[in-house]
Amino acid sequence: MQILGYAVPSLQSVLGSLNLLQLGFIGMVVIILLLFSIRMTFALHGTRYTFSRVAFVPIVYTLFTIYLFYQSVGMNISVLGTDYVLHSYVLLIPAGLIVGFAAGFKGGRSVKFYEKKSSIHFRKSVWISLFWTLTFVLEFASLIYFPTLNITLLFTGLLSLATGMLDGQAIRAHFMFKANKKKITTT
């Protein structure tokens, strides 16, 4: 096809010349940047407080984490053997969740409540949000790009720690809100 004397390649020739692995990598980078920017925007600027929002987000992230655990276990069983992987995950995941929950509950003191347009808003810890987002991305990327390496076990442990921190922070935020419901004012 010619436009103003220049040859314009067809869509089929453009798609045929693209390497699908590179296109997948570019898509992955775009999704990661989108997830990262959304998480950091909510962490920095806060969001409206409702119990369902405080409870729903950690539940969804816990489900993401569990899904990646199962993917990671399946990948590592084929490489490392059943006993090693199952024992490692049985010890690692609950320990990470428990330690993370305690750290998140303590870190939940940094949650700030404020009033904006006659509704209560809250701002969570940027560090906990950043830590969970980075560990989630590392776990996801390791499952896609390095499925046969034992590094996914390390990222799974870090992700369980970060998920425990999110859960602990959410419970602490809920208790702080209930305890200080009448004291919350504009900051």
Image: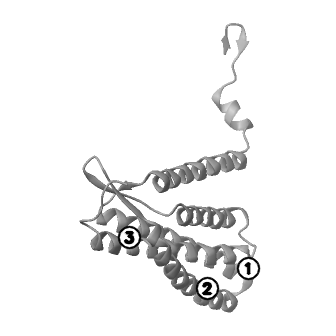
Label 2: few (<14), some (14–19) or many (≥20) C-alpha neighbours in 10 Å: some
Reply above or below: 78 against 11.
Answer: below
Q: Nearer the viewer, residue 5 or 35?
A: 35
Q: Nearer the viewer, residue 154 or 117?
A: 117
Label 1–label 2 contact, CB within 8 A:
no
Q: Residue at x 67, y 36 (%)?
A: 15
In the rendered structure, which amino acid carries the disc numbered 3?
A: Ala
Q: Which residue is mark 2?
A: 92
* Marks 2/3: CA–CA distance: 26 Å
Task: Label 2, secondary structure: give it.
Answer: helix
Q: Residue at x 64, y 49 (%)?
A: 29
Q: Which residue is mark 1?
A: 79
In the rendered structure, which amino acid carries the disc numbered 1?
A: Val
Q: Which residue is mark 3?
A: 173
Q: Nearer the viewer, residue 178 or 60?
A: 178
Q: Position of residue 32 (x, y in %)?
A: 60, 53
Q: In this rendering, would 25 be left or right of 166? A: right
Q: Residue at x 64, y 29 (%)?
A: 11
Q: Quadrant of residue 58?
A: bottom left
* Marks 3/1: CA–CA distance: 41 Å
Q: Who comes first in sequence, dot 2 or dot 3?
A: 2
Q: In this rendering, would 109 be left or right of 129? A: left
Q: Quick one: quadrant of the N terminus? A: top right
Q: Residue at x 71, y 7 (%)?
A: 5
* Marks 1/2: CA–CA distance: 18 Å
Q: Who comes first in sequence, dot 1 or dot 2?
A: 1
Q: Quick one: quadrant of the C terminus? A: bottom left
Label 3: few (<14), some (14–19) or many (≥20) C-alpha neighbours in 10 Å: many
Q: Who comes first in sequence, dot 3 or dot 1?
A: 1
Q: Position of residue 96 (x, y in %)?
A: 57, 82
Task: Label 1, secondary structure: give it.
Answer: helix
**For the residues carrying marks 3 and 1, which lies nearer the camera in this image?**
3
